[in-house]
Image (cartoon, rainbow, N blue to C red):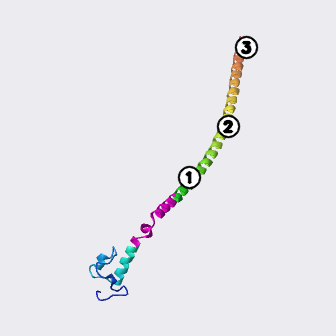
Amino acid sequence: CRTSRSHFGSSLSGRSHSLVAAPSVLSRGNYSPMKVFVSVLAVAAGSGTEAQANPIRRVVSMLQDMQAKIEEEGKRQAKAMDKYRCYCKTNDEELSKSIADGKAYVELLESKIQAATNGKAQAEADLKQAKEDRAEANK
């Protein structure tokens, strides 16, 4: 492998190369075109455009990302709030109807109790009269 040099040429020889990930491969003198290519790709991937970007651009990008996250969170909160409003409105209507039905039922029961009380009083009066009539009849 030492003698086979491809189109990468002799510029990749030894430790004098400026690649960060490549010295371990190149320092041993055991390099093939594929190893060099992979090393170059690794260095290129490690030094992405973010690391070399203008600091102002990074701040602007960070602010744009924050803005997108905040807008998304706002949409989720608005959706949850709409759902909560619907729940409250529906629940309020159901509870109001239930309360009105309960009040009407209470009035109905009160009238039935009153009628039963009147019926009992009438039955007691009739019983008392029947006992008096029986007592007079037995004399």
* Stretch in magenta: 45-66
Comes first in the chain, label 2 or label 3: 2
Task: Tell me how far mark 2 sits from mark 3, CA to CA.
Answer: 55 Å
The numbered mark at residue 99 is none
Amino acid marked by disc 2: Ala
Which residue position holds label 3? 137
Foreground mark, 1 or 2, reads: 1
Q: Residue at x 48, y 64 (%)?
A: 57
x and y, in percent, of residue 66 in the image = 50, 58
Which residue position holds label 1? 77
Amino acid marked by disc 3: Ala
Comes first in the chain, label 1 or label 2: 1
Q: Main secondary structure of the magenta part?
A: helix
Comes first in the chain, label 3 or label 1: 1
* Membership of 71 in magenta stretch: no
Q: Secondary structure at mark 2?
A: helix
x and y, in percent, of residue 59 in the image = 47, 61
- Quadrant into which the C terminus falls: top right
Q: Residue at x 28, y 80 (%)?
A: 14
Task: Tell me how far mark 1 sits from mark 2, CA to CA.
Answer: 34 Å
Which quarter of the picture shows residue 11? bottom left
